[in-house]
Image (cartoon, grey):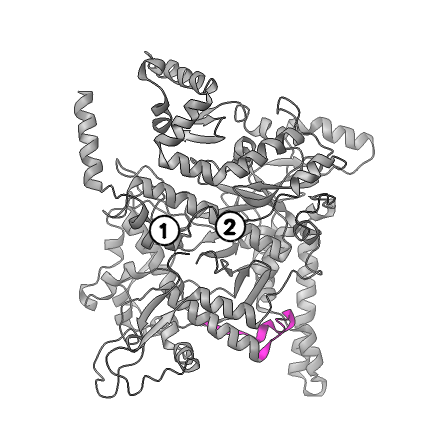
Amino acid sequence: MEYPSIMLNALDFLPPSENEPQSITWYNNPKLYYEPRLTLAVYLDELKHQLKLHNPDNSKTKDHMIKLPFSWSDWVDLTMLNSEIMKPIGLKNNCEWLQKEANKRTRFPDFCKDLVDLSDEEIDEIGLSKDQLPGFIVKSSPMNKAPHMEVMLQGKSYLYTQQENPLTLVFLTSNGTYEAQLTEKREKLLQTDLFHRFLKRRKIDCKQAHGVVPVEFNPQSEFRKLLRAIPPRPLDPKDDLHGISKIVSNKGDRNILRQLNLDPSTFHYTQQNVEQQIASYETRLSKIEKVITDELNYDLNVLEANRLTRHELNHYRGLKYANSFSVDVEPTYYKLATLKKNQYNLDSGWHYEWRFFNGAMRYLKDETWSYEQMEVREQIILDRLLRNWFKFAEAKGIVSWIAHGPLLSWYWDGLMFPFDIDIDLQMPSSELNRLAANYNMTLVIEDLNEGYGKYLIDCSTFIHHRNVAGRDNHIDARFIDVDTGTYIDITGMGLNDEKPPPQYDNYINEKTEANESVELYMDRRKHWLNYEKINPLRYSMLGGVPVFVPNDIMSMLNHEYPRGTKSHYYDGYYYVPLLRLWLQESKILTAFKPEQYEAVTDEARQENILELIKNLRHEDAFQLLTSSNDILIEYYLTQKYTGLHVREKQLMMDEASERSILDLEHNEQYNSLTSNFYIGPPLRKCLFDFEYYGRFKHMAKQTVSTIVENEKMEESKTF
């Protein structure tokens, strides 16, 4: 990271001195303050101290002894609310104002309550005073369409006043994790004693100080101290149900077959399993109730043996709640940032979680942003989402594989498409349940040596239903970037009671005639796969990140995307084989003269460009690289991985790249190649560095006014 630390005046964050009791500091200022370096540095220092005191071996059995306070306003930038918070109560905008530009009246009028109408009990429940709140207290999504600003304010109001705290913080490292339990009550960092303890451990005494007491907040420095003091926790063998550690811990070993063989039972998560889990939890709860209500049977050992962790209690409640609904009437779980489209915004908002929405990928929030900068921001966000999910999954032994669009993009060059912001993963249904039981409502913190990313694991309450829902609820879990609202969609594959599509009739008949189990699975989006298409999972790379891919890739892609593996054009982008990149048309045409590609129709023009790319010479490719810094940088960053992928495809597929080779167990060349698959440094700067520093330093600004002016010039040419 280029800017890992910040110097701040400690007095600005402490209560006013006795000499100036009326002065305003961030301690008593109703305005929200956001500085992730301060938050992370203080939390890491406290985490190190508590671990040294209570859990020096970083043992899982002592996780409950490490407790930290939490408020979303310390971890997500909610300062957009300040303009509303700082108004006098009588002048604050209300719920009606928040909906004035919506496309239609909401079907959920109770989604919001005006601040002036809140009862004292409701204020107490929020845990903030009236002068610390906006005039609109959003309690749920209105589920209609509104402009960017209003949709952002809706999510930030909900996050600030209603969203429950995560249960756990998990800090990723290069070889394990640290964990801390989070208190249920909303507590801002400065309202706790964490900041005081941070200063005290550095022997900084502010009692008699005046003016400025400079203090450095450097999360990377604090992270290194933590790493030296306490070992990160490696993957527990008991949690490594599928043998992931054997693959990821033997880097460079050419004799290791890097594939996972999943037992079919992994996909057998049924109502019987739901009932068994409920019964198991209730047996433990009844034992606890017996010993605490009957003094003659009180036994501390029984309490300890049967107590439920907060994750287990959350899982039990989810099981019970889901069990109270049939699939036909289960309520919608996930809500999206549905945006009102116009000539300046073509994004409908369907790719953003509404609570954490912070502006669409290509939406210019202000004059400091350019479209070129937004494209880089998008790449960073998607790269880090994928990277941090698979780092977390490897650290915890969770099995998943890339699916749908990401699998198709993998086919082409081993990178993610530059025109697709969807990341889709699948996992076995029992693995999905394990994720929910152990890690639902966990906030995952990126390796602090790589960035300040924060990701919430949010599993739907209705993952225990494996048939198709009456409406919505097609997604089972999400890995949400809380800084942007973008996410990874996770769906579980497993047995169900739905009718399979006709394409599987032969498979069912063959299995039935052979008296073999019909291992045919579906997710709740009606995607069907048989066991043999999935298993074994193969270790691969996507954008420099180790991932798993399913066994019979080509049959999946040929069915889901009949032209997807053949068409070299999509939505203004062309695939350039010599560079192994998808590039925008405007960037490609610099290598050619207009008379080489211009035509009477768009279709003919497109065909001309495709033919030129097909016959592209090395000197033309060199001209492309030297004519555009964007292309040159992208090629430089990715050529190692795309080169490996070319060889990988040759070994995994037939000569025409139309069929998968299903048995690679004894292919020494394949095993040798996959020994090169391991996670390296991130391809790009972290989002924080880029948004606050890098884009100003390394990318020329193109303002909105400049863009509008250019568009006017283009329109004048047209007419």
Q: 121 or 503: which is nearer to us?
A: 503
Q: 519 or 377: which is nearer to us?
A: 377
Q: Is residue 10 above or below residue 328?
A: below
Q: Quarter-wise, where is residue 256 in the image? A: top right
Q: x, y percentage for residue 443?
A: 49, 61
Q: Quarter-wise, where is residue 176 in the image? A: bottom right
User: Tag 1: residue type?
Assistant: Phe
Q: Position of 70 compared to 362: left or right?
A: right
Q: Is residue 470 visible?
A: no
Q: Is residue 636 above or below residue 627?
A: below
User: Tag 2: residue type?
Assistant: Pro
Q: Position of 273 compared to 475: left or right?
A: right
Q: x, y percentage for residue 373?
A: 33, 43
Q: Mark 1: which secondary structure?
A: helix
In the rendered image, which residue does mark 2 sit on?
681
Tell me, yes or no, whether the highlighted magenta stretch contains residue 62.
Answer: yes
Q: Mark 2: which secondary structure?
A: loop
Q: Is residue 662 above or below residue 319?
A: above
Q: Is residue 95 visible?
A: yes
In the rendered image, which residue does mark 1 sit on?
690
Q: Residue at x 41, y 39 (%)?
A: 633
Which residues are drawn in magenta? 54-70
Tell me, yes or no, whether the highlighted magenta stretch contains residue 717.
Answer: no
Q: Residue at x 71, y 78 (%)?
A: 302
Distance from the alpha carbon under mark 1 to that under mark 2: 16 Å
Q: x, y percentage for residue 670?
A: 69, 36
Say whether disc 1 or disc 2 marks the residue closer to the N-terminus. 2
For the C terminus, the quadrant is: top left
Q: 668 or 111: which is nearer to us?
A: 668
